[in-house]
Amino acid sequence: MQNKKITVFGATGKIGSELIALLSAAGIETIAISRNPDKAIRMPCVQWVQADMSSRESLYKTMEDADTVFLLSGHNPDFVEEQSNVISVARELGVKHIVKLSSAAADKDSPFSIARVHGEVEEILRNAGIANTLLRPTGMMQNWLGELAHSVKTEGKIYDATGEGKRAYVDIRDIAEVAFRILLQPEPHAGHSYFLTGGTAVNYGEVAETISRITNQNVTFVSLSIEELRQRMQQQGKPEWVINTLLAYTQLQRDGKTAAVSTDVETVLHQPARTINDFFRDYKNAFLK
């Protein structure tokens, strides 16, 4: 068991909040970082620290007692600078290991912003001289709790332009558990990149069938064209760069290029990744009309 604390950036997000709950339950002294202290969730063994990743000076207090850091932040125009600041201060303070939440598509030469910035930060981390582990999840099941759940509840429909293309969506709880295991014993995972997926690739027709069966209500998949999806997102007021990035990932799935399934979750956790059946059973109420 490690003596020093674990620092978690992005502690109030979906993955971060699951992770600090696991650390707290295990009695691990944790420093949880948030820009906004009003979002802090009080729990045993968790010390909340307010900091801004764009300010190097604010970061020293976040890692002065930590050997290990979980690095996650939301996407914004300063993403690379902010994560680079954390890596730089971590190196200065003698942090021994960084676990970075990256992207399955990470590539510093990618034309798509999310994939590109993760790729750029991965390279900075590799060159920083700190032991590290990269977590590269594919599409996340909990993203279905937003717009998709709303359209299921109000219309009994799922709208998407992925056609019959499949993806092995991963449950955020599995991502958090993988991060938890690695943070507790990081040495065996140094230098590893883990591609985190669910155990089976599915398309949205199969998602609709699963929701129908578990909720005992009729849910259908409405297959849109790429242009129809673009117009739908524009009407929702999404920024153009977000629309272009989402459409690029949609096109890849539509073209059958995202169906890869990895066993990395099972490798780290010694148990199979959660399935969409597990997810929809656990979150059933979010999809009931």
Image (tube, rainbow, N blue to C red):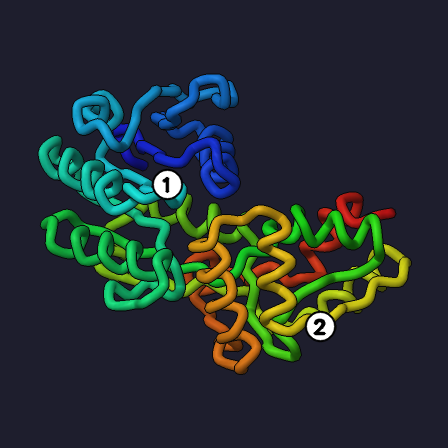
The kind of residue on which mark 2 rests is: Ser
Tell me which residue sits at (81%, 67%) in the image: 220
Question: Is any atom of residue 200 visible in this view?
Answer: no
Alpha carbons under labels 2 and 1: distance apart: 32 Å
Tell me which residue sits at (39%, 45%) in the image: 75
Q: Nearer the viewer, residue 74 or 265?
A: 74
Tell me the residue that label 1 is attached to. 73
In this view, the mark in front (2 or 1)? 2
**Above or below — where is 170 with respect to 206?**
above
Quarter of the image holding residue 201? bottom right
**Label 1 neighbour load within 10 Å: few <14, some 14-19, many 20+:** some
**Above or below — where is 287 with respect to 262?**
above
Tell me which residue sits at (34%, 26%) in the image: 31
Count the marks: 2
Question: Is any atom of residue 160 visible in this view?
Answer: yes
Q: Nearer the viewer, residue 58 or 175?
A: 58
x and y percent of residue 107 in the render? 29, 66
**Above or below — where is 109 with respect to 34?**
below
Quarter of the image holding residue 276? bottom right
**Above or below — where is 121 with respect to 275?**
above
Residue 223: image tag: 2
**Which of the marked residues, 2 or 1, is nearer the chain's N terminus?**
1
